[in-house]
Image (cartoon, grey):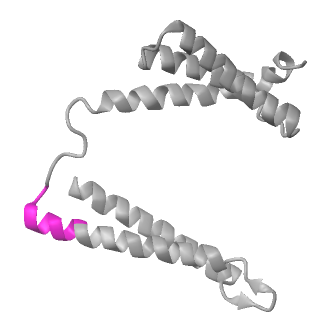
Amino acid sequence: MRKAEIVVSLLFMLVGFIVIADSVRLGFMWGRTGPASGFFPFYLGVGVVIASLIVLLKAVNEYRKQGEGKPLMPPGALKPILWVVIPSTAMVAIMELVGLHIAAAMFLGFYMRVVGKIGWTTTLLVSIIAPLSLFITFDKLFLIPLPAGLWGGYLLRF
C-alpha cells in the first residue's frame, strides 16, 4: 500500500510541475487588467505539488517505520470495482451510438436491476423518468442539446 501511495504522489507531483511550467509560460503574474492566463493554474499546480509532497513524506516515513503495510487491494475487492467500471465503460460506448438519453436509461435500468437488485417497477420508472427529465430540461427548455450519438438524433425527434 505504501508503494502505491509513493508512486501516485510522485505522479501527481509531476502533473503539478507540468501545470506550473505551462502557467509560467502563459504568464502567472497580476497584469494591468487583472490576473494573467496562468495565474490560477499556477497556484493550483503549487497546491498539487505541496499536497503531493505531504503525502509522499508521510508515506515514506510510514514505509520506513512499518515496512510494506497492508496490500493495496484485499482479496475479493476487484469484483465490486469491476461492477462499476464495466457498466460505465459500456454506457460511454453505447452513448456514442444512441446518445446520452437512451444510454442513461439503459445504464440506470441495468445498474438498478442487476447490481442494486431493485424491483422492476422502480427500475422502469427511474430509468425512464430521469433521462426524460434531462431531455425536457436541457434539450427543450434550455435549448442545450446533449450528445445524441450516431442514431440518437433520429430516435429523439419529436
Q: In the figure, 48 relative to 80: above or below?
A: below
Q: Is residue 99 visible?
A: no
Please tell me whether the stretch drawn in magenta is mainly helix, strand or loop.
helix
Closest to the observer, 51 or 141 = 141
Q: Position of residue 3 (x, y in %)?
A: 24, 57
Is residue 2 shown left or right of residue 105? left
Give the extent of the magenta segment. Answer: 59-68
Closest to the observer, 51 or 60 = 51
Taking the magenta stretch, the answer to whether it contains residue 64 is yes
Closest to the observer, 119 or 87 = 119
Residue furthest to the bottom: 32
Is residue 22 shown left or right of residue 139? left
Q: Residue at x 37, y 66 (%)?
A: 10
Q: In the figure, 12 relative to 135: above or below?
A: below
Q: How many marks?
A: 0
Q: Residue at x 72, y 77 (%)?
A: 37
Q: Quadrant of residue 144?
A: top right
Q: Position of residue 21 (x, y in %)?
A: 57, 78
Closest to the observer, 77 or 128 = 128
Q: Is residue 5 visible?
A: yes
Taking the magenta stretch, the answer to whether it contains residue 29 is no
Which quarter of the figure is the C terminus placed in? top right
